[in-house]
Image (cartoon, rainbow, N blue to C red):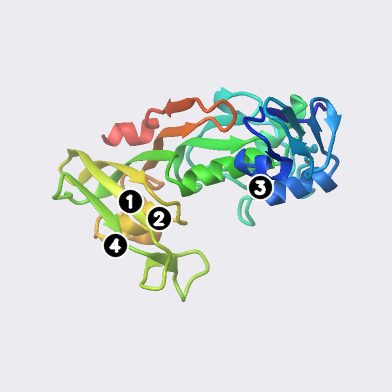
Amino acid sequence: MKPFQLTYTAESQSLLREALGEWGISKRTLASVKYGGGQILVNGAEVTVRHPLEKGDAVTVIFPNEEHGKGLLAEDGNLDIVYEDDALLIVEKPPLQNTIPSREHPFGSLANIVAKHFNDHGIPSTLHIATRLDRDTSGLVCIAKNRHIHHMISMQQQEKKMKRRYEALVHGLVEKDEFTITAPIGRKNTSIIEREVREDGQFAETEVRVIKRLPDYSHISLQLNTGRTHQIRVHLAHIAHPLVGDDLYGGKRERLDRQALHCTELELIHPVSGEKLFFSSSLNEDMQALV
């Protein structure tokens, strides 16, 4: 399997270590290159990070091949690929599929199927799922093809350069057309799974816009400005408009046997080319029927 590699051009004189940091190579990634079988070349010759760079030098970072965890079984299954290149894989996850295996659902997860795809196509990477979705939630998922690309995407998320938008159906009629929910989220003391709004929680922010008001529901659009566990579900329950089908946070399953949430848009900067990427996805049939 050919290892993933990137080539940069030095724009000025500097130490190689400093230039690598400016290009987004983290210390952790650098350690994996150094001790895991990777290489750093300057104009084709292997060097150490103390090497002095001249303007115009070509720096090639060869990342070590990665392996799946032994506990992750590669399985056949349908993989709805929206976009793929050497760095990224964007897919559509159907509802009622885990993103990663769990004790209750050890097989058939998106991760299991992506592992098989990587094996079949000689992609030397473990699973780096950058935007996980709950089992019930459908829509777009971003997967990085190595540790460095995952780090670059994580940095975009922290700097709010990556945007994820969702559409949802919630109980009741949401009054305001547009508003922002800013409320810290933490784990509920009485539950391993459930989260809640609490003063000592992590900062969390969700933008909400009403698309359509229906007799019993509101069809809304949401943008995540942070990525806390169960963020949308907790924030909507907090304002007394829980997701339809989300019985963990107060929703009812009379009309839909899963939470009515779909990741419709994903916007990011390509971590290698710097190109702006935009992906969109239509609602699944079950949500579309209610709308």
- The residues tagged by marks 1 and 2 sit, at their Cα atoms, a distance apart of 8 Å
Residue type at mark 1 is Thr
Amino acid type indicated by mark 4 = His
Whole-angstrom CA distance, mark 3 to mark 4, is: 37 Å
Residue 238 numbered mark, or none: 4
Q: Badge 2: few (under 14), some or many (20 or more) residues near its Cα, within 10 Å?
A: many
- Percent across and percent down for residue 269 are 49, 32
Element type where label 2 sits in the image: helix
Q: Residue at coordinates 82% horizontally, 27% vertically from top-left?
A: 1
The Cα–Cα distance between marks 1 and 4, rounded to whole angstroms, is: 12 Å
Q: Nearer the viewer, mark 3 or mark 4?
A: 3
Query: Going from the N terminus, do you reach mark 1 or mark 2 first?
Result: 1
Q: Residues within 10 Å of mark 3 (few under 14, many from 20)?
A: some
Mark closer to the observer (1, 4): 1
User: Residue 4 or 240: which is nearer the viewer?
Assistant: 4
The answer to whether marks 3 and 2 mark residues whose Cβ atoms lie closer than 8 Å is no
Along the polypeptide, which appears first: circle 1 or circle 4?
A: 1
Residue 76 appears left or right of 198: right
* Residue 231: image tag: 2
Pointer 1 residue: 206
Rate crowding at label 4 as few (under 14), some (14 to 19) or many (20 or more) other CA atoms within 10 Å.
Answer: some
Q: Which residue in the structure is indicated by mark 3?
A: 26
Q: Are marks 1 and 2 in contact (CB under 8 Å)?
A: yes
Kind of element beneath mark 1 = strand
Which residue type does callout 2 highlight? Gln
| Amino acid type, mark 3 | Ser
User: Residue 64 at what x, y percent from top left?
Assistant: 80, 38
Circles 3 and 1 in contact, beta carbons < 8 Å: no
Which mark's residue is nearer the viewer, 3 or 1? 3
Q: Rounded to the nearest whole Å, what is the CA distance between mark 2 and mark 4?
A: 10 Å
